[in-house]
Amino acid sequence: VTLANEWRAAFEARNHKILLCNNVGNGLTACINENPDAVVLDFFFKDADGNLTGDGALTFTTRLGLHCYESGMKMPKLIGVTASKPKDFFPIDVFAQLPRDAVVKRLRKPIPADELVVQVERAIASKPAN
């Protein structure tokens, strides 16, 4: 939570609106209601039952992608963070079914708050793949 608060302060200092969600259900509800430009997603995310699991982030991403596909909502840019090797826990093929403009960044924690803000701003500014 301390790291999340540091990140929140850095984003708010740059006038970004931040929603902090701690499980799949809250995250999906926030995304559906707020339609964010980007989501910073820790791999170890609580699932719908409140259990901290490595499947939480993948479940969230899959459900959000399905919602966006079915509703026509724009898929937010996804930036995955983990204390483990990002390529091991955010396999790029998992995201192959997502819209091409859902740029996936995979970052290793700890990441300084200012650097995370830069990475998110770059992802938001990136153009869709052709």
Image (cartoon, rainbow, N blue to C red):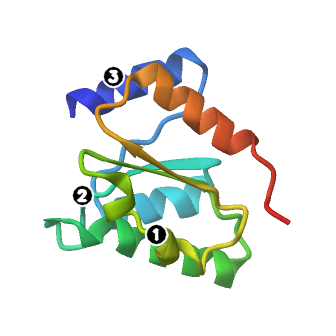
Q: In the figure, 59 relative to 112: above or below?
A: below
Name the residue carrying label 1. Answer: 61
**Which x, y percent locates residue 93?**
50, 76
The quadrant the C terminus occupies is bottom right
Residue 111 drawn at (x, y percent): 36, 30
Q: Residues within 10 Å of mark 2 (few under 14, many from 20)?
A: some
Q: Splitting the image into 4 quarters, where does residue 72 fall?
A: bottom right
Q: Amino acid at mark 2?
A: Phe
Where disc 1 sits, the SS reads helix
> Which residue is more in the foreground, 26 or 110?
110
Q: Residue at x 61, y 50 (%)?
A: 36
The residue under the point 61% across, 74% down is 98
Q: Residues within 10 Å of mark 1 (few under 14, many from 20)?
A: many
Q: Nearer the viewer, mark 3 or mark 2?
A: 2
User: Distance of mark 1 from mark 2, alpha carbons?
Assistant: 13 Å
For mark 2, give the secondary structure. Answer: loop
- Compared with residue 46, is residue 18 higher up or lower down, i.e. above or below? above
Contact between labelled residues 2 and 3, with CB atoms less than 8 Å apart: no
Residue at figure coordinates x 27%, y 29% from the top left: 3
Percent of width and height locating residue 79:
50, 49
Q: Which residue is mark 3?
A: 6
Residue wearing tag 2: 44
Disc 3 is placed on an element classified as helix
Q: Residue at x 44, y 42 (%)?
A: 19
In three-dimensional space, the C-alpha distance between marks 1 and 3, rounded to whole angstroms, equals 24 Å
Mark 1 vs 2, N-terminal side: 2
**Figure label count:** 3
Q: Report the quarter where the N terminus lies.
A: top left
First of labels 1, 3 by sequence position: 3
Q: Position of residue 50 (x, y in %)?
A: 17, 65
